[in-house]
Image: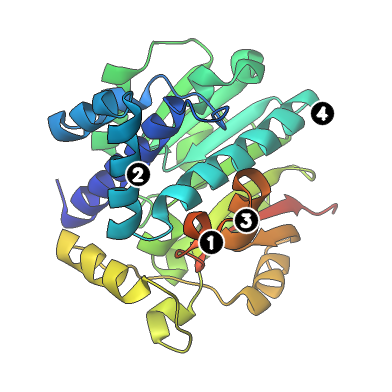
Amino acid sequence: MSRLERAESRTAQYVAFYRALETTERARSPLFKDPYATSFLDRGLRLAVWASRLAPLRKALVTYADRRAPGARTSAIGRTKFIDDIVRAEIRAGVGQLVLLGAGYDARPYRIAELAQARVFEVDQPNMIEMRASHFPRSSRVRRVAIDFVRDDLAATLRQAGFESEKRTIFIWEGVTNYLTEQAVGSVLSFIGGCAPGTTIIFTYIHRGVLDGTERFEGADKLMENVRRLGEPWRFGIHPDELRGLLSGFGIELLEDFGADEYRSRYLGTEPSDLRGYRFYRIAVGKVAPR
């Protein structure tokens, strides 16, 4: 496994842990239920999820997680719910294809009922595709597509797997762009911009100020140190003021662009303890413009 794969794998573990904690939430209605999340965790994190069923231990675990990486948990569960809602709305509007770019531990094809009739393409590095095959049930509607986002041709690889670019599609690109080069990000956006008008892209990105030091965010310095320690620092970010122009250049219209404060407060309220940190971790929604 490459350093990049190790870094992404460990990061994905923490996101799965946050989703598992949310699934076992009892103090309020959980934002979503992901029955697969715990299966991806190592022994220690699985034990933590089990312990979280006891209210006092759960409170201690959540407090520890939030202090260790301020805002990461609430950002993860807030954007999970945000993306879920968009996927459901698009499927109900008649979209029949979903592409997970960097599928990781994403269980949406198996936990969102509206996707039962959709054709799904799970795209990720070979080791992650093998992992998904061992954790998720086989389905004739799901295609698992191994790719190197930096070296391989996404369009050709998806076509070989049966993807139909003339049909409206939902692309989910969560937790990936910050690991890529600018050229690789542009290549993916160019491909999506050439798909059927009305195609939706939902993606996360980090504020470029985190990378070049032009803006300060709570907890960002510690986080950057952590990802460097994992073996692969983040490479790519976008300044929010430049996002609309960037997407427009690829034939994509920007519909929404939210920082963490905005997308998580929609579902988690406005308590300061819930909303600190991770303000640089943004989510955007775009649609391929008519041609």
- Residue contact at pointers 4 and 3, CB within 8 angstroms: no
Q: Which residue was labeled with disc 2? A: 62
Above or below for 168 versus 290: above
Task: Tell me the kind of residue under disc 4.
Answer: Ala
Residue in the foreground of this view, choosing between 71 and 111:
71
Above or below for 159 versus 219: above
Which quadrant of the view contains residue 66?
bottom left
Q: Residue at x 57, y 77 (%)?
A: 239
Residue 96, percent from left and from top: 70, 24
Q: CA distance from mark 4 to mark 3?
A: 31 Å
- Residue contact at pointers 2 and 1, CB within 8 angstroms: no
Q: Residue furthest front?
A: 56
- Regarding mark 3 in the picture, which secondary structure is present there? loop
Residue in the foreground of this view, choosing between 229 and 249:
229
Residue 74, percent from left and from top: 48, 49
Q: Which residue was labeled with disc 4? A: 93
Residue 215, percent from left and from top: 48, 85
- Residue contact at pointers 1 and 3, CB within 8 angstroms: yes
Q: CA distance from mark 4 to mark 2?
A: 37 Å
Residue 50, percent from left and from top: 26, 23
Which is in the foreground here, disc 4 or disc 2? Answer: 2
Task: Tell me the kind of residue under disc 1.
Answer: Pro
Tag 3 or tag 4, which sits nearer the N-term?
Answer: 4
Tag 4 or tag 1, which sits nearer the N-term?
Answer: 4
Q: Which residue was labeled with disc 1? A: 272
- Regarding mark 1 in the picture, which secondary structure is present there? helix
